[in-house]
Image (cartoon, rainbow, N blue to C red):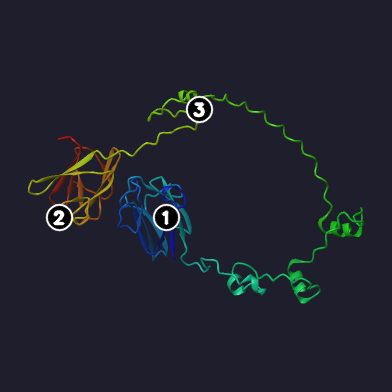
Amino acid sequence: MPARLFCKTGELAEMAFVIDQEAVIGRLPENEISLFPSFISGRHACIYFDAKENGYFLVDLGSSNGTMLDGVAVTEPIRLERLHVITFAGQCDFIFQDFSGLDVPLERPGLADAASGDLVDKTQGGGFFDAVPARPREGAEDTQEKTQYGAFFGDLPPLPDVGGEDAKEDTKERTQYGAFFGDLPALPEMPQAPEPPETPKPEEKKHAADALAATPPYAPGEDAISSDDEPDLVAVPTAPSAAFELVVTLPDGTKEVFALREGANVLGREATCDLTVRDASISRSHACVTVQGERVFVEDLGSKNATYVVDEKLTGEVEIHPGAEVGFGHSVTATLRRKGSA
């Protein structure tokens, strides 16, 4: 496993990927690493291995919301070391680890069965831990087992007999034990913390009708209503639906209207695309139109005949507004408009 990329927090927690030579990261399903949130660009960033430099590099692919390495914006290809935090679109934190060239095994080897009474298998476990001899059996006093165990841990003096006749000041047992641990002075008595004042109980409601009358009905959009008896109610906003459509004009003058949905809308010649346009100059997966609330973005997906906005060839994802004209291939044009507008 040369390198891996994984997330432990947020909505992408528990996602993990192995990276070998190259991995394109983005929202499109054909990427090596596909991330579903709408704020991630179709082709957001790329991590690749440079054999000449013998290391991994990170590059942003012209994403809308950017890529950061350890909190610094990535504006050009940058070399990766053993461990980094990579943030996509300012919201998704991933951990990058490079294991290439490491001699240490990635998984802890198993240890010998402790119930056998033998030493720990140093060939397997000794790579991480020194071999520890087994504890001596009961009654093995002055035997080789005790000598072996005592040589590792050292012999401890017995504890003094508490409560017997020998529990007197300055006895032999106390002297031996004190020589090992030292006599510790008694701890001073700590003052007790004062008891907290008793919290007055709220007035009990005697009738169910009184309790219901004291609680006004909840209305979405208003401030949360709280009382001493009920938890705060918070309104959860719902995701807005897309309110845009794309009017596509074919070379023969025919117009087709496509309703755009929230998130990614792939335009291409394939029937599996969200927006299928039958024209020879259109690639199978030509471009992606992304709706994020009240904002719309368009990005070329590496098509053969390119995508244009205001006669400029796209090299990354750009934002478009209602009335903007987009060119796909040689002779297909499209205009963005709001639903219901002529």
> Quadrant where the N terminus lies?
bottom left
Amino acid carrying mark 2 in the image: Ser
Q: Are marks 2 and 3 in contact (CB under 8 Å)?
A: no
171 lies above or below 213: below
Task: Name the disc covering residue 227, or none.
Answer: 3
Q: Position of residue 318 (x, y in %)?
A: 27, 44
Task: Name the disc covering residue 327, or none.
Answer: none
Whole-Å distance between the Cαs marked 3 and 1?
Answer: 40 Å
178 left or right of 95? right
Residue at image coords 62%, 67%: 129
Name the quadrant containing residue 305.
Answer: bottom left
- Of mark 3 and mark 1, the one earlier in the sequence is 1
Circle 1 or circle 2, nearest the eye: 1
Between 239 and 8, which is closer to the camera in this rendering?
239
Circle 1 packing at 10 Å, graded few (<14), some (14-19), many (20+), is some
Q: Position of residue 54 (x, y in %)?
A: 42, 65
Amino acid carrying mark 1 in the image: Met
Circle 3 packing at 10 Å, graded few (<14), some (14-19), many (20+), is few
Name the quadrant containing residue 236.
Answer: top left
Between 209 and 258, which is closer to the camera in this rendering?
209
Amino acid carrying mark 3 in the image: Ser
18 lies above or below 330: below
Q: Are marks 1 and 2 in contact (CB under 8 Å)?
A: no
- Per the image, label 3 sits on a secondary structure element best described as loop
- Of mark 2 and mark 3, the one earlier in the sequence is 3
Task: Name the disc covering residue 281, or none.
Answer: 2
**Residue of label 1:** 15
Circle 2 or circle 3, nearest the eye: 3
Between 195 and 14, which is closer to the camera in this rendering?
195
- Of mark 1 and mark 2, the one earlier in the sequence is 1
